Image (cartoon, helix red, strand yellow):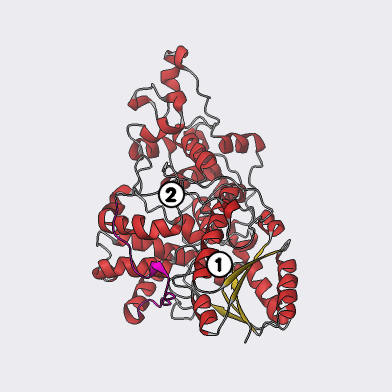
Amino acid sequence: MNNILWVRRDLRTHDNPALLAAIENGATCAVFISTPKQWEQHHLAPMKADLMCRHLQLLSEQLDELGIKFIHITATDFADQVTQLQAYCSDNNVEKIFANTEPECDELKRDQAVIERGLPLELFQSDTIVPVGKVLNKQGEMFKVFTPFKNAWLKRVQQTGIECSPSPPSDSTSTLGPVSNHSDIDGNSKANHHLDISAESSGNFDIGYPRESSDRWPLSETVIKQVIPEFLVNKVSSYHDNRDIPSIKGTSGLSPYLAIGAISPRWLAIQLIQQNPEVLFDTQHSAFSWLNELIWRDFYKHLLFHYPQLAKGSNFQTKYDGLIWHPDHQNFKAWCEGKTGYPIVDAAMRQLTTTGWMHNRLRMIVASFLTKHLLIDWRWGERFFISHLIDGDLSANNGGWQWAASTGCDAQPYFRIFNPITQSERFDPKGIFIRRYLPELADLPDKDIHFPHDYLKKHPDQDKYWAPIVEHKQARLRALTFFK
C-alpha cells in the first residue's frame, strides 16, 4: 500500500499518532504543504515562521532516520492545499493519508474538503492532553467556566490516565535526557542553536513567507534533553512564586514549541506527573500551578472546538456585541510602539516587538490597558499579538484577549481594571525589567520608575520619556461607564 503522512502543526516524532499509524501501515513518504497566502491571512509572525522552518528541517532529518522521505509541496492557501494534495495522491497512487487534527475553523473546513474530494484521510487527535469533546458537564455541554472544567479534567485524567503514542524506535525523545546547566528559555537567551535552513538535506524549505531569526530559541531536541529536565527538577516547584516576575526566568518557555507542535502537551504532562504523581490529586501541590497552565491551554482549545465562531472574531459573551469601541489609531500606534507613558506597558511592548515574546503577566497588563484604558477593540490587540508572537496560538491568544476585555469565557469582570502603576510596583518593584527595555529610564530611582513623570518634571535634564496618553483614574471611570 502507498500510504503517506501529512505533516501539519505537529513537527515532532514523539507522541505523534499519525506518524505511528503511517509507519505501521508501511508509509515511506511524508508531505508538508506550505501555504504562504493562508499564513498571511492568519497573520503568522515571521519569527514563528522561522522557528517552524528550523523544525521542518529537523523533522526531515528525523524522518529520514526512520526511512521516511520528506517532501515539500508549495501551495497558496488551504483551497490550493487540497488541490495540491489531491494531485500528489493521484500521481503517486496514494491509498491512505494519515494526519493529526487541527481545531481551528479554516483547518476543519479544509479537512472536510479533503474528505469530500474522496481522499482517504484518517485523522488523529494529539494537540490537547484530553481530547476535545471529552470534558463536558452533566448536560453534555462544554463548560463555560474554567474551574468546573479543571475539576472535570482532573477527574478524567485520574480515572483514565493520559494517552500518549509510543515513539518510533530510533526517536531520542522517548526518554528524558540528562539534566544540564542549560538555562530556562524565554526569548532572551543568547544561546545560538540555529540550524541553517539553507543546508537542508531533504528538500528546500523556501516557504515563500517573511522570516525573522528565531536563533534565541534552541531546537526542540535540545529543549527536550536539557531544558525540560532542569525545569522539572529545579524550577517547577517555585513556578507559582516566580511565574509573575518578568525580570527573572521563572516560566518554562515552552509555548513556542507547543504552538508549532514541536513538543507534545501530553508528553509534557506525563513527565510532570511521573515526577510528581500527587499533583493530580492536590491542587495545593507546589507543581500544580504549572499543570494548571496546561489545563488552561486545553480549556481554550476545547472552547474553540465547541464554539468555532471564536475563530471569526466573535465575542464569546454576545451581550457585549453592542460595545462601540474607540477606533483611535493614534493611541493604538502609541501602544504598539511602547509609547503610552506607562513604563511597564511600554517595556512589555518593547519586549514583544524586539524578541517576539512577552511574559504572561505583562500580556494581561497590556491587554487590559488597550481595552480598558484606551477602549480599543480587543481584536486590534489580538491581531497585533499574533503577528509578532513566536508562540502565537489562536485559541490561547483569543482566550487571553477576551479574558482581558471581559468579553470572553470566564473572563475577568468588566470592573476589574488593572492599574499599570501598581502592577509595575508589585511585579517589577526595582524596575529591573523596565530598565532592560526602556534604557531611557535607566538612571531613575526605583520608587519613581513606575510612573516617572513627577520626577522628570523636577529633573528636566533626564526627561527622555514621553507623557502618558491617558490619566489612569479618568480612564478607569470612563471604562466603567463604557461597559455599564
Question: Where is residue 294, by image quadrant?
Answer: bottom left
Q: Which sits in the foreground, 235 or 157? A: 235
Report which quarter residue 33 is drawn in. bottom right
Residue 359, x across and y down, in percent:
43, 46
For marks 2 and 1, the one nearer the N-term is 1
Please determine whether, in this image, residue 484 is positioned above or below residue 345.
below
Q: Is residue 54 magenta?
A: no
Q: Residues within 10 Å of mark 1 (few under 14, many from 20)?
A: many
Q: Is residue 328 left or right of residue 456?
A: right
Name which residue type carries label 2: Asn
Q: Nearer the viewer, residue 127 or 10?
A: 10
In terms of secondary structure, where does tag 2 sit? helix
Residue 169 is inside the magenta segment: yes
* Residue drawn at (26%, 71%) of the image: 281
Instruction: Using the image, tell me which numbered label, if any, was put on residue 118.
Output: none
Q: Residue at 69% across / 82% down in the picture? A: 119
- Look at the image and tell me in which quarter the N terminus lies: bottom right
From the image, give the main secondary structure of the stretch colored magenta: loop
What SS does tag 1 mark?
Answer: helix
Residue 17 visible here: yes
As shown in the figure, which amino acid type bears the numbered disc 1? Leu
Q: Which segment did they paint magenta?
A: 161-180
Asked whether disc 2 touches disc 1, contact meaning CB atoms under 8 Å apart, the reply is no
Say above or below: 312 vs 28.
Answer: above
Classify 10 Å Cα crowding around label 2: few (below 14), some (14-19), many (20 and above): some
* Farthest-out residue, bottom: 1
Q: Which residue is mark 2?
A: 360
From the image, tell me which residue sits under label 1.
Answer: 304
Instruction: Give how far across and how far down residue 395 sits, in percent.
Output: 54, 61
- Which corner quadrant of the image does residue 4 belong to? bottom right
Residue 340 position within the rendered picture, expressed as x and y whole percent measured from the top left: 53, 32
Seen in the image, is 63 located left or right of residue 233?
Answer: right
